[in-house]
Image (cartoon, helix red, strand yellow):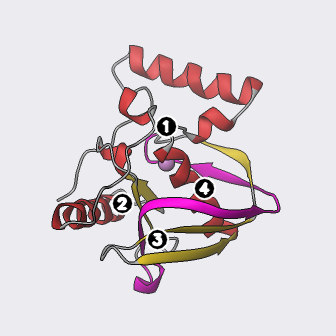
Amino acid sequence: MIRPILKYGDRGLQQPASPVDAVTDEVRTLIDDMIQTMYAAPGVGLAAPQIGVDRRVFVIDVSVGQSVSELLALVNPQFESRDGMQLEEEGCLSLPGFSATVARPACVVVTGLDRDGQPLRIEGSDLLARALQHEMDHLDGTLFVDRLRGIKRDVIVRRIGKLRRTGKW
Ligand code: NI
């Protein structure tokens, strides 16, 4: 089932999410809904808080549906390591129409559980590293705009404020 995606300004996006106790059928249904919602958007990743669910779960597909083997679902993910630095343009389904250059580590290793509750370890570089960190941020209540400084951040926040006041957000 495709779920509505919360937008910047919704409090649900700004709070750390709760860990999953056990990977049950309910969690697998959540993951399936998140995959459908991500592909429908379409987007590279989606975290549970973006559909208003307070759980540490995200899905990523850097191929955006072009290659089944790229699809990842992670439950209770944690960083094992973060190295290097990359500067690339980044967007978010919760900030439609906005993007900015964000500094992120270039390589990450993330561990967690898969949809069957089995341990999973993902090594990512470039876009996958960026997506993993972006979705990890969502689980901690952080959006890419929160990682911007000064005028770059102010411009986006002000434009969203204007859209909201005119009922377009
Ligand atoms: Ni996002």
> Which of the two discs, 1 and 2, sits closer to the camera?
1
Task: State yes or no: discs 2 and 3 in contact (Cβ < 8 Å).
Answer: yes
CA distance separating discs 2 and 3: 9 Å
The residue located at (46%, 31%) in the rendering is 14
Q: Is 69 rendered above or below residue 57? A: below
Task: State yes or no: discs 1 and 2 in contact (Cβ < 8 Å).
Answer: no
Counting other residues with Cα less than 10 Å from the Cα at mark 1, is it few (<14), some (14-19), or many (20 or more)?
A: some
Task: From the image, tell me which residue sits under label 2.
Answer: 38
Specify the amino acid type for callout 3: Asp
Q: Is 57 rendered above or below residue 107? A: above
> Which dot marks residue 61?
3
Give whichever of discs 2 and 4 has the lower sequence position: 2
Specify the amino acid type for callout 2: Met
Task: From the image, tell me which residue sits under label 4.
Answer: 133
Q: Secondary structure at mark 1?
A: loop
Task: Give the overall secondary structure of the magenta segment.
Answer: strand
Give whichever of discs 3 and 1 has the lower sequence position: 3
Judge whether residue 79 is colored magenta. Answer: yes
Give whichever of discs 3 and 4 has the lower sequence position: 3
Specify the amino acid type for callout 1: Gly
The residue located at (24%, 61%) in the rendering is 27
On the picture, is 111 further left or further right than 3?
right
On the picture, is 45 further left or further right than 104?
left
Residue 113 locus on image (x, y percent): 41, 70
